[in-house]
Image (tube, rainbow, N blue to C red):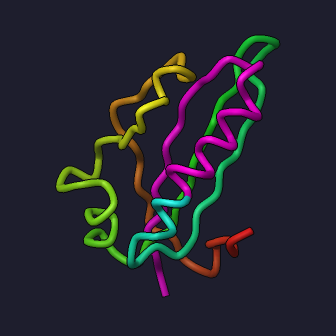
Amino acid sequence: MSSILREWRGVIRREHRDEYVSYIKGTGLDDYRATPGNRGAAIAVRDLDDRRTEVITLSWWDSLDSIRAFAGEDIELARYYPLDDKYLLERPRTVQHYECHGDAAPGTP
């Protein structure tokens, strides 16, 4: 059975890495998982240099309608939370969606 992968990327200051990961777990990832049709979510980080860290959130969905329930009518637009501006150096306007095949969604930690 296929699913849809939603990918968002942002860049933060490296010193805020742990704090931002914790913040996203309690906002974005919790909201993904609370939306009917969500199959799982994860956050990944990598240091770009000694000052910046890239953050990626991945979420797996049953359908585009499930994503709409989370993101709103225009599913291509990124959804942000109140404190994101405190952390983000780059705030992309859009996200990417991919058709997934196989059992790729992680379990909830």
For this orientation, the residue located farthest to the top is 51
Q: Residue at x 78, y 15 (%)?
A: 49
Give the residue furthest to the right: 50
Q: Within the magenta stretch, is there residue 48?
A: no
Given residues 61 and 109, the one toward you in this image is 109
Q: Quadrant of residue 45?
A: top right
Q: Position of residue 61 (x, y in %)?
A: 44, 71
Q: Residue at x 65, y 50 (%)?
A: 43
Residue 9 is inside the magenta segment? yes
> x%, y% of residue 55?
63, 36
Does residue 33 appear to the left or right of 37 in the view shown? Answer: right
Q: Is residue 68 above or below residue 13?
A: below
What quarter of the picture does the C terminus occupy? bottom right
Q: Which residues are magenta?
A: 1-29
State the image quarter where residue 46 is shown: top right
Residue at coordinates 29% horizontally, 42% vertically from top-left?
77
